[in-house]
Amino acid sequence: MPERADLIGELTAEHRAIDALFDGIRAAPPGGPERKRLADDVTARLTRHAEAEERHLHPAVRRYVADGAAWVERERADHGRIGGILREVADRGPEDPLFTRSLVSLVEQVSLHVLEEEQRLFPRLRAGCPPDVLRDLGGRLRADRVPPTVPVGPPPHGTWGARLLRAVLGTAPAGRRR
């Protein structure tokens, strides 16, 4: 990816990286530790991606896309559905048949979300947002990224992941209760 990719280019590249992880999950033997490791990797990647969308994409959509607030609400609803499925995946071992069903559901929901963004939302944002703003937002997203080599543990209280867990489970992550 070019160093100067704009926000849409950065998010699209992340979508392709997530697709590659899904390909790895499909290729991994069912019930094996490799599939669980890849599921954990995709969980971490999707969590960081959702946080980046909330921090960079959603404010731009609200400002530059007609009916932007409604678009953001749909995005947030998608994130909530996907977060619930991620919790199902995290709660099961790879030998559990529900683990595989949850992975299939995750791939379906993420694929629909990506399709909606890339075919409908991103073109609207590109049409309404000045190119220099998109480039600046792409730079900010790159600057905010957590290096992929840094382990991602339970989300700290107050972050997107913690809010998601509270919304799905009605609780904060272990050790982070109020």
Image (cartoon, rainbow, N blue to C red):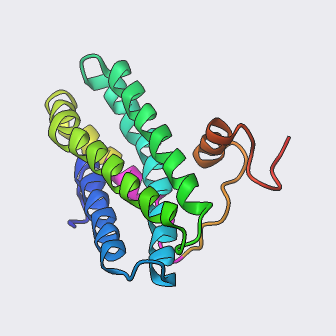
Horizontal and vertical percent for residue 65?
A: 25, 24
Chain part drawn in magenta: 138-149
Q: Which of the two residues, 98 or 23, is positioned nearer the viewer here?
A: 98
Question: In this view of the protein, can residue 44 be seen by the observer?
Answer: no
Locate residue 122 relative to residue 26 in the image: left or right. left
Q: Which residue shows up at 30% across the image and 52% down it?
A: 11
> How many numbered badges does the structure rendering display?
0
* Residue 142 lies within the magenta run: yes
Q: Quadrant for the C terminus, please.
A: top right
In the displayed orientation, state which residue is furthest to the top: 67
* Residue 32 lies within the magenta run: no
Horizontal and vertical percent for residue 124?
A: 17, 30
Q: Which residue shows up at 24% across the image and 50% down it?
A: 6
Horizontal and vertical percent for residue 158?
A: 69, 42
Tell me if residue 159 comes above or below residue 45 in the rendering: above
Q: Which residue shows up at 33% across the image and 63% down it?
A: 18
Q: Quadrant for the N terminus, please.
A: bottom left
Question: In this view of the protein, can residue 60 be seen by the observer?
Answer: yes
